[in-house]
Image (tube, helix red, strand yellow):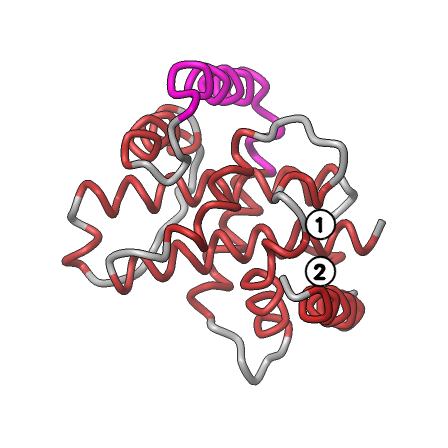
Amino acid sequence: MREERVIALAGLFQAVALVRTVAVRGGADPFAMQPSLASIFKIDADSPADVFGGVGNLRPGLETLIAQLDSDKRDLSVTRVAISVMRVESKLARRPAILSKLRTGIEATARQLGGIDVTDPLIAARLAQLYVETISTLQPRIVVEGNPQFLRQEAQIAQIRTLLLAAIRAAVLWRQLGGSQWRLIFRHKQYSMMARGLLAQCTLSGT
């Protein structure tokens, strides 16, 4: 179970790290974003790894998670967003009407845009609007820091909101597996060790 929680955490931190990249640099590698964005549509999956298309797709997330659990390498901006995501997801879990609207919107987007790559700007636009109608109604909102030039552009804003939706998806999985902020605080050394083990598996398998 703990290894599954680490997989969920890696998914969360992978999405948050991508949010940071878009906010600071104006964009991120579509190949790196694909597993995070695809996870939004995997509402029902056989295992936590399946949500992200396999542990091999979480290499950046595992690396970010390990760095965040190591106080010497921690990026506080990533930490702040990750904590905000967990708090918002906790509020979302207590708002069944918003949760239902979010699920319905995701399923509708999947039907309407079936066959389009999840990194397509049209997908980002649809999911970003859904984010505004659901997640953004929960207070306090998730605040993303970055380059003001990019944080004013619609394309970047849409990407950020969509990636935050992916982070929320991972946070939902984390909570469903029994995860909590207290567990992360008190078991961060165990989670770091497990993340390193999963990362080593990715390396050995060549993924």
Q: Is residue 45 magenta?
A: no
Q: Relative to 138, does residue 113 appear above or below in the rendering? A: above
Residue at the far right in the pictured view: 1
Q: Main secondary structure of the magenta part?
A: helix
Cβ–Cβ under 8 Å for marks 2 and 1: yes
Residue 171 in the image: state x and y as whole percent: 61, 43
- Which residue is outermost to the front? 206
In the depicted structure, whether residue 174 falls above or below residue 58:
above
Query: Identity of the amino acid at label 1?
Result: Ser
Q: Position of residue 7 (x, y in %)?
A: 70, 53
Mark 2 element type: helix
On the rendered image, what quadrant is the C terminus found in?
bottom right
Residue at 26% from the left image edge and 44% from the top image edge = 157
The tag on residue 59 is none
Q: Give how far across and how far down residue 28 sits, in percent.
A: 34, 57
Residue position for label 1: 180
Residues shaded magenta: 90-115
Q: Residue at x 62, y 43 (%)?
A: 53
Camera-side residue of 101 and 34: 34
Mark 2 Cα within 10 Å, few/some/many (few <14, many 20+)?
some
- Which element is circle 1 on? loop
Residue at image point 69% right, 40% down: 50
Counting from the top left corner in percent of width and height, residue 8 is at 67, 49
| Distance of label 2 from label 1 (alpha carbons) | 6 Å
Q: Amino acid at mark 2?
A: Leu
Q: Which residue is mark 2?
A: 184
**Foreground: 93 or 158?**
158
Viewed as shown, does residue 56 lie left or right of 127? right
State the residue at coordinates (64%, 39%). Answer: 51
Q: Is residue 107 on the magenta stretch?
A: yes
At label 1, counting other C-alpha atoms closer than 10 Å, the crowd grade (few under 14, some 14-19, many 20 or more) is: some
Relative to 73, say whether 135 is above or below: above
